[in-house]
Amino acid sequence: MELWNKVVLITGASSGIGEATAREFARAGAKVALVARREERLKALALEIGELAWVYPADLGDPDAVVAMAARVRSELGTPDVIVNNAGAGTWQFADETTPHDFLRQAAVPYLAAGYVTTAFAADMVRRGSGRIVVVNSPVSRVAWPGAFGYAAARWALRGLVQALQADLRGTGVGVTEVLPGKVSSDYFASNPGSEERIPTISALIPEVTPEQVARALVNATRKGRRRTALPLTLRLILGQAWVTPRLVAWLTAITGAKRPEQAKR
Ligand SMILES: NC(=O)c1ccc[n+]([C@@H]2O[C@H](COP(=O)([O-])OP(=O)(O)OC[C@H]3O[C@@H](n4cnc5c(N)ncnc54)[C@H](OP(=O)(O)O)[C@@H]3O)[C@@H](O)[C@H]2O)c1
C-alpha cells in the first residue's frame, strides 16, 4: 500500500509504540488520527507532526465513546485507510489476585477496544474495498506465562480477533496484520506497576526493542501487506520453536516465570 495522503487512525498514540507509529506514518506522508485518553499528550504530538495530524481523545473501553470518536473521524477525515489497534493496558496478576472488575479492565483495552474500533469502521472499509487493520499483540498470545492471567487471556482473545477478521475479510480488499513485539522500552511497565518483575527470566534471551523499531516494522508490514510480523529475530526463533514443540516452550516459560511468595520459598 502506498501511504502518501492515506488516513491512518492510531489508538494509544499518546505514548510508546502508538506515538512512534504516528510519527513513522506521518513521515511517509500519511494523515494521522491520534486516539487515546490523554488529550494534552496527543496535542503535543500533533503540534510536533504538524498539518498531517488530528487529535481524537477517547476512552476506548467505552463503546459509546468509540462510536462518537468514529463519527468525528468520518466527518473530518473520511473512513481510515489503515486502523492501528495498539492501545493497551493491564497489570499482571495471578488469577487468584484478580477481581472480576480487574479482569474486565484487563480485557477492555486492548481486546474489547480493538473490537469496538474495528467494527466502528469495518462496514465503510469493506464497502470501499480497500484498507488494512493492524493489531499490536504480545508474545503471551502464543505462550501464556504465570502471574499475568487477565493480560494473557486478553491477548489470546486478541489473537482470536485477528484470525476471525482474517477469515471474515478474505476477498474484500481489506487486509489484516498482527504485530508481535518482545519487550519494548516504553512506559508500559511504569503505567502497570507490579508487572515487569513477573516477566519470565527466559525472556532475557530476547533483546529489548524500542518503540521506534516496532513502529518501523509495523509501517513496513502495512506497506507490504504482511499478515504478521514479530521482532526482534530471537523472538521469531522462539515463536518458531513454540510452533514445533509447544509443550517444551510452555514448560520453559512456566518454570522461569513468576512465583507466588510462598512458592518462591520452597
Ligand atoms: N511494552 C511492551 O513490552 C509490550 C510488548 C508487547 C506488546 N505490547 C503491547 O503494545 C501496546 C502498546 O503498549 P506500549 O508499550 O506502547 O505501552 P504504553 O506506552 O503504556 O502505551 C499504551 C497506550 O494505550 C493507551 N490506552 C490505555 N488505555 C486506554 C483507554 N482506556 N483508552 C484509550 N487509550 C488507552 C494509552 O493512552 P492514554 O493513557 O493516554 O489513554 C497509551 O497511549 C499494548 O497493547 C501492549 O500490551 C507492549
Image (tube, rainbow, N blue to C red):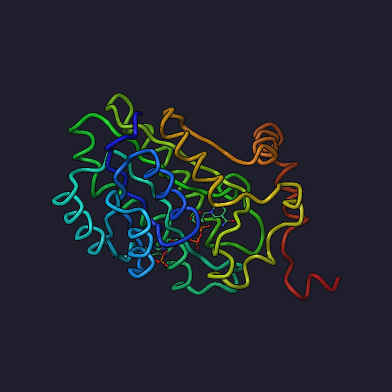
Please give the name of the residue rendered at 54% of the width and 72% of the height, measured from the top-left corner: 98
Please give the name of the residue rendered at 60% of the width and 41% of the height, measured from the top-left corner: 231
The image position of residue 233, as x and y in percent, is 67, 37
Q: Toward which corner of the image does residue 230 lie, by quadrant?
A: top right
- Which is nearer the eye, 12 or 3? 3
Please give the name of the residue rendered at 35% of the width and 63% of the height, measured from the top-left corner: 42
The image position of residue 24, as x and y in percent, is 43, 44
The image position of residue 186, as x and y in percent, is 56, 60
On screen, residue 163 above or below 55: above
Please give the name of the residue rendered at 59% of the width and 74% of the height, measured from the top-left corner: 97
On screen, residue 248 above or below 172: below
Q: Is residue 74 left or right of residue 44?
A: left
Q: Quadrant of the C terminus?
A: bottom right
- Which is nearer the eye, 12 or 196? 12
Q: Toward which corner of the image does residue 152 lie, by quadrant?
A: bottom right
Q: Toward which corner of the image does residue 112 lie, by quadrant?
A: bottom left
The outermost residue toward the top is 171
The outermost residue toward the right is 266
Q: Is residue 243 left or right of residue 251?
A: left
- Which is nearer the eye, 178 or 41? 41
The image position of residue 119, as x and y in percent, is 26, 47
Q: Is residue 96 left or right of residue 166?
A: right
